[in-house]
Amino acid sequence: MDRKTKIFIFLFLLPAVVGLGLYAYYFSGWNLSISMTNARSLIFPAEFIGLGNYERFLGDSVFITVVKNTAIFTVLFMGGTLLLGLLLAILIDQGIKGEGLYKVIILIPMAMPMVISGVLWSWMFSPRMGVINSLLRVLHLDFLTQPWITSTSQALLCVIIAYIWVFTGFVALLYLANIRSLPNEQSESARVDGASKFQLYWRVIIPQLRPATVMAFAVLFLNSLVAFDLVWTLTMGGPAGSSELLGTLMYKQTFQWNYFGYGAAIAQIMFIISMVVMVPYLYRSIRRR
Amino acid sequence: MSKVTLNGLTKRFGKVEAVKNVTLKIRDGEFVALLGPSGCGKTTILRCIAGLEKPDEGDIYIGDKMVTRLSPPDRNVSMVFQSYALYPHMTAFDNIAFPLWIRKRPRDEIREKVKKTAEILEISEFLNRKPGELSGGQCQRVALGRAIIRNPAVFLLDEPLANLDAKLRISARGELKRLQKQLGATMIFVTHDQVEAMTMAERIAVMNNGVIEQFGSTDEIYQQPANMFVSGFIGTPAMNLIKCSLVERGGSISLILDTNTLPVPDSIGRALIEKIKSSDMVFGIRPEDISIHEKNKPNSYKTKVYVVEPLGNEKLVTVEMGNTYSKVRTRLDFKQEIGENAWVDFDWNRAYFFDKRTGKVIMHGLNKSANRR
Ligand SMILES: Nc1ncnc2c1ncn2[C@@H]1O[C@H](COP(=O)(O)OP(=O)(O)OP(=O)(O)O)[C@@H](O)[C@H]1O
Ligand SMILES: [Mg+2]
């Protein structure tokens, strides 16, 4: 590349870098500074209290619940979405008719505003009027009806199912693109050599889906850390904190109870976790190529 | 090992008829080449035999068993793809072991067989490397290894040497031929390189436009081409094909090439006249069956040197006769340069005559000797 090209590239990248820099670094810094105050609004001056908010959070009774819920959420949501997405991709890869249509349909949940998905799923999960329980009653399977989002033991699961539903199509398309990018002759060769469909996918195709997995992992992980909208519309973190996640807790502390400093500290912790996991992860997966 | 029979095989892709009513009988343990220009349907035939393509008409037999409707795993064939289709995430060892691995053979047996296969192919040192860390030639041998590790009824090889560099390709030809003999396997390989087909195969099926123009031994294909297509495809350089017509004047028979008149030896002329329906035909003669002289000789024809290509141990001269150009192989000490005159005469016993319309061979000087054999 000659000098001129380099300068051009630099100039074209500049606005994006400046914008991103301002957004990512300036506001992150601002959030960090607020997190070390006892601010109860964004306007009135506040007192510097160092790491007080962080200490308070670690000692807070909801801390354990939130950490536990976030861990369960992350593992089940990511595992479920990756698995379902992969299965869906393999299903579509079988050369079904109307593939284009399916690709559009499975992307709809992702394209829909999360709040609307939340409302849809609250119709599904509502214990008395909800679609699922009504259907079970119609089928005379009343004994299978569940309290769903009103139960402390099932609320988090309902939230996870809704999140899986939103992201599965996206992950499926990532996997499908990856599968389709593999040379057709590899699967043909495997078939001639006697491999069954299962062996073909298990031995030949799935081991080569690393690029899509890396990509999906990054997107899903970040989304599970910042999960908020769907949780809020479905359960608001309840009942009794049983589906409380970092996102909902931060929102409540900041905007419902006006503990801006405390909320900022929770946001800061979310930021740190995502950096600790994502930076080495992205670095390694980019380096690998 | 098994024989392979194709019976009236036809394969269409939409409106394109890639393979048209092909019938081919390949013997048990035979090494056969499918030779033809790009797009003539070679790969399609191979894929039909492997079961990767469903024929529209016709049947395929492997051994005595009809396999037309069987799926690839049930046909017991091995295929080496042009791209090799190695699995990039597996080592060479695992690639070779794959067919046994999916058959759930015991580990010891797999290790034993991979070791033996690697020895045959001389790739024992590379077994721990992945395809990305192997050269083209090594990849090709790994792909061959994956094909020979089990005992299939037939081996199908799609341009197995096409991805190798020129030098490696020549040595690989010999190795592949030895390997085939060693295994005593029925092997069908696809190539568009006639030298490769001639040097390796026992019999060659010359294809064009989805049909087999001729199926025969290398000698037959070379010495008794069935038609103009085959004669124009085989040989380096291929046979000269010159449009001409036959005339009989005052008891002597001549060929008219453009404006030149060439008297033809009586025995050949008489035989020709008996066989032809129209006087228009195509005269074929190989570059090595034309002699070229710097000076006029009785019964030779004046031409102009168009281009001279020295090949190290001989020269390839293109001469201009009226509007046609012919290639001539000659000694290195041939002196004439571009634009100078040269005189040629033909070895009539090695001349071929083709029907201009159908392209079919009418007669060739070798007919007599072929009969005597
Ligand atoms: N999957 C396909 N869909 C449509 N047309 C095809 C398909 N496969 C092959 N063809 C067509 O069938 C004809 C024969 O193709 P084939 O691949 O058998 O040729 P080939 O002799 O192997 O050529 P090459 O030497 O270039 O590999 C070509 O005209 C090609 O365009
Ligand atoms: Mg081909």
Image (cartoon, coloured by chain):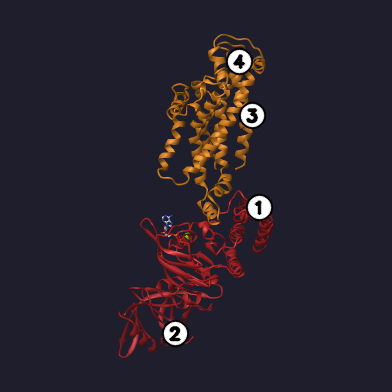
Chain colours: A orange, B red
Dot 4 falls on a residue whose secondary structure is: helix
Residue B120 falls in which quadrant of the image?
bottom right
Crowdedness near tag 3: few (<14), some (14–19) or many (≥20) residues, C-alpha within 10 Å? few
From the image, tell me which residue sits under label 4. Answer: A262
Above or below — where is B63 with respect to A104? below
Check the residue under mark 2 and report the chain it is in. B
Check the residue under mark 3 and report the chain it is in. A
> Is residue B319 visible to us here?
no
Query: Dividing the image into 4 quarters, which one contains the N terminus of chain B?
Result: bottom right
Q: Amino acid at mark 4?
A: Tyr
Q: Amino acid at mark 2?
A: Asn
Residues tagged by mark 1 and mark 2 found on one chain of the structure: yes
Residues tagged by mark 4 and mark 3 found on one chain of the structure: yes
Instruction: Give the x, y percent position of residue B338.
Output: 45, 73
Mark toward the start of the polypeptide (4 vs 3): 4
Question: For the point 61% across and 39% down, which residue is it?
Answer: A285
Q: CA distance from mark 4 to mark 1?
A: 55 Å
Instruction: Give the x, y percent position of residue B154.
Output: 54, 64
The circle drawn on residue A276 is 3
Q: Is residue A250 left or right of residue A133?
A: right
In the orientation shown, which residue stands out farthest toward the top?
Answer: A44
From the image, tell me which residue sits under label 2. Answer: B349
The circle drawn on residue B129 is 1
Residues tagged by mark 4 and mark 2 found on one chain of the structure: no
State yes or no: Cβ of the residue under disc 2 lies below 8 Å from any atom of ligand 1: no
Q: CA distance from mark 4 to mark 2?
A: 104 Å
Q: CA distance from mark 1 to mark 2?
A: 57 Å
Above or below — where is B213 with respect to A159? below
